Amino acid sequence: MRKGQQLPWIVSDELWARIEPLLPVVLRRADHPGHIRLDDRKVLSGILFVLYTGIPWEFLPQELGFGSGMTCWRRLRDWHEAGVWQRLHESPLSELHAAGALDWSKAAVDGSHIRALKGGPKTGPSPVDRARAGSKHHLITEAHGILTGGNRDDVTQLMPLIQAVPPVRGRRGRPRQRPDTIYADRGYDHDKYRKQVRAAGITPIIARRGTEHGSGLGVHRWVVEQSLALLHWFRRIRWEIRDDIHEAFLSLACGIICWRRLVNLPNGRGCFC
């Protein structure tokens, strides 16, 4: 971090202006008011502190003023169930689309194994990490990541990944949801899925198994590898045992990545996640 730069878990005015309208309103009961509810902005900073640092919830420092780890955990869960993180992800996409910063002529897909030290649902033995428990994050750039067990084949996740692209508004006419062409490595190689991709109106360009490396697809696929690197820079991504909290962190991280791309326009090209 550069000297004088704001700590990444401190919620800036710009980010708060985007998130605050998305949060559900919680009315205080008049008959049993209980404790005063901690400010949402401070709790969000606590959630981001855990996401960025990977610290266990129970070790969240009280002197930071972000509330207890359990308070932050509950708000993360509740806001995920309310669809806050999903809307946080879709809103910058619409603005990027309106600005012409999304390239719908092509998309790239890839997956990356990450160790699940505590195990939990949607994990499995990783084929690239001595069968240790892990998850595999699948991403489509210029979209969503699909979370599956570490022992699931890439090819089975290709269509769910394409279908996970939300309708992106921002321009006149119908919302855009499908790229023209999709690039993928040989992990997604199967003629059955090529046919399904074509049936969705997308041209598949997928490397073939058994062929020499150096297909040239890397010039198109580097954007998704970059997005995976950005996603895994958030250290807490795979510590959670509960899959809903894991998915909440994934959705929040994708929303922050897209929001940063929007803030940094005109360098926002190449983002669906």
Image (tube, rainbow, N blue to C red):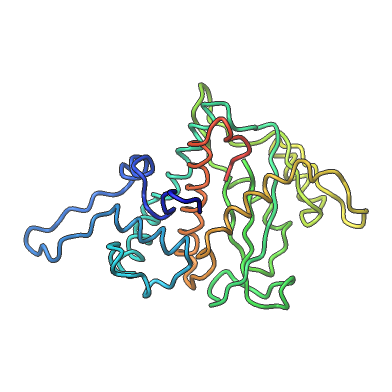
Q: Horizontal and vertical percent for residue 172?
A: 51, 21
Find residue 44 and report its image quarter. bottom left
* Left or right, residue 148 beside residue 186: left
Q: Residue furthest front?
A: 3
The percent position of residue 259, horizontal first and vertical second, equals: 48, 41
Q: Report how many numbered discs are placed on residues in the image.
A: 0
Instruction: Left or right? Give the position of 246 relative to 40.
Output: right
- Which one is in front, 193 or 225? 225
**Residue 268 position (above or below residue 232):** above
Horizontal and vertical percent for residue 153?
72, 63
Where 37 falls versus 6 (above or below)?
below
Residue found at the very far left of the displayed protein: 31
Compared with 19, 94 (above or below) is above
Tell me if 238 is positioned left or right of 245 in this view.
Answer: right
Pick the residue in front: 134 or 38: 38
- At horizontal 47% and vertical 51% (from top left) the residue drawn is 3
Residue located at (52% from left, 50% from top): 254
Residue at horizontal 24 percent and vertical 55 percent from the top:
39
Residue 69 percent location from the top left of the image: 34, 69
